[in-house]
Amino acid sequence: MAAPALAALSDDAAIVETIMDRARTAQATFERNGSQAAYDRAALAVAWALMDPDRNAELAAMAVETTGLGNVADKITKNHRKTLGLLRDIKGAITHGVLSDDPATGITEIARPKGVVGAVVPSTNPVATPTNNAINALKCGNAIVLSPSPKGNAVCEKLIGYIHAEFAKIGADPDLVQMVPAPSSKAKTQALMETCDLLVVTGSQDNVRRAYSSGTPALGVGAGNVTVIVDETADLGHAARKIAASKTFDNSTSCSSENALVVVNAIRDDFLREMHAAGGRLLTGGDAATLKDALFGGGGLNRHMIARDLPDMLSAAGVTVPEPETARFVLIEGDGIGPAHPESGEKLSLITTIYAARDFDHAREVTATVLAHQGAGHSVGLHSTDDARARGLGETLPTCRVIVNQAHCFATGGSFDNGMPFSLSMGCGSWGGNSIDDNLNYTHFMNVTKVVRTIAPNEPSLDDIFGDYWQAAGR
């Protein structure tokens, strides 16, 4: 009996069940007839659906128009760079068949798909994130069902249409990539969470918590609230330009854009001059208070200010900045850290909080306090010529990444000049309540089966194990 048309179904669970049935059928065939070439070809089809320049421009414009977040030029760049970088990372990667065969251990490792991936998509990246997830899923022989945010429904549907057009060229089943249809609802997302084989959740921390309690294996990512230290050894001009480039990219939609700067007092004045030259405008006194009230006064972030162009954001706040023709973002001084000081949290806007530090050790203490409030596990930045300080931050702060002398939002999720995997989802480890501490990548989208054979016995004696301990502590 044919599956009912989705339009004829009124029950949210029934709609998701129908989609999942189609995805499971498509995935089973994809796996049964699978090969590395077939998996790679399907992944490339998804990538080209977005990377075709005309489609990229159309989807970027549609994303900004429908969500009201970010800007078109940077979305085009993000869509291209993130997809190209991912393709670089997975090119030649083995995700089908034998991964390794080690005579010494007698173990053969075999790549196997997870099944059907459910991916909850944020409104901040309604095109790049689902594309990234779909590429990773298909590379490993899975199907994927996307659950976009309400504002991202239309652009996700358009993206999937282009993916299906590419699938038609290679004879791939369109049911390998589907979406939960509009209107979005928590009931549909919950049904997807409970019925798929692997959950990937980016964005709302409420969704992440729901994913972890759904009973389905889940890959969730923690809250971003990037804090960056600028110390007395830094190249201040270089630091200011990198911070400005990162902070302003796509109007700060990235979870990796700088939300707080901790600046050592010895170079504060010089650094602020460099920041001014790079487009940063420090607001103080009444203007800063007005800006804070406008952004945080309603109990949550003002939707008319988040991820908006600077003139629109300032207009919504009712403030002006010096030399507006060259201004790119705003700096405000932090009055404190914690729930009573919302400027110490993630702002998703062209606003960065600046904190003063007596010296580097104090800067580390301030950063630790910010992370304890919000953003633990995600990442911190350091602008310094003392590399030992970077290692020290990695050994002492609750963070999975220390980004050194780089534009943070470009570097954290992978860059062509660093070794991080390209990704739009950064695991935050146990500090951020996550199951992974690295950048979400293709290895998280496959199971590994081990064929285990006997080898020559390797059983140590008690003396081999305890000899040094007995010598030190006695028996």
Image (cartoon, helix red, strand yellow):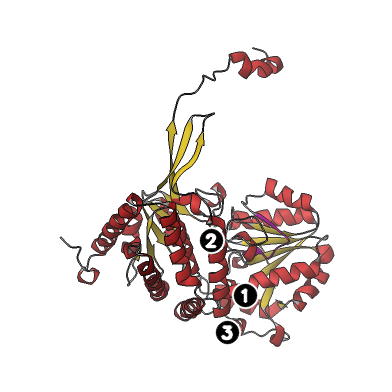
Q: Is residue 149 toward the left or the right of residue 435 in the image?
A: left
Q: So how many labels did they put on this image?
A: 3
Q: Residues within 10 Å of mark 2 (few under 14, many from 20)?
A: some
Which residue is labeled 2 in the image? 87
Compute the Cα span from label 1 to label 3.
11 Å
Compute the Cα span from label 1 to label 2.
30 Å
Q: Which quarter of the rendered picture does the N terminus lie within?
A: bottom left
Q: Residue at x 82, y 71 (%)?
A: 269
Q: Residue at x 53, y 70 (%)?
A: 79
Q: Secondary structure at mark 3?
A: helix
Q: Which amino acid type is marked by label 3?
A: Asp
Q: Which residues are magenta?
A: 402-409
Compute the Cα span from label 2 to label 3.
36 Å
Which residue is labeled 1 in the image? 350
Q: Secondary structure at mark 2?
A: helix
Q: Is residue 102 above or below residue 66?
A: above
Q: Which amino acid type is marked by label 1?
A: Leu
Decide which of tag 1 and tag 3 comes sooner along the chain. 3
Which residue is labeled 3 in the image? 312
Q: Which amino acid type is marked by label 2?
A: Leu
Residue 306 visible within the image: no
Q: Secondary structure at mark 1?
A: loop
Q: In front here: 409 or 430?
A: 409
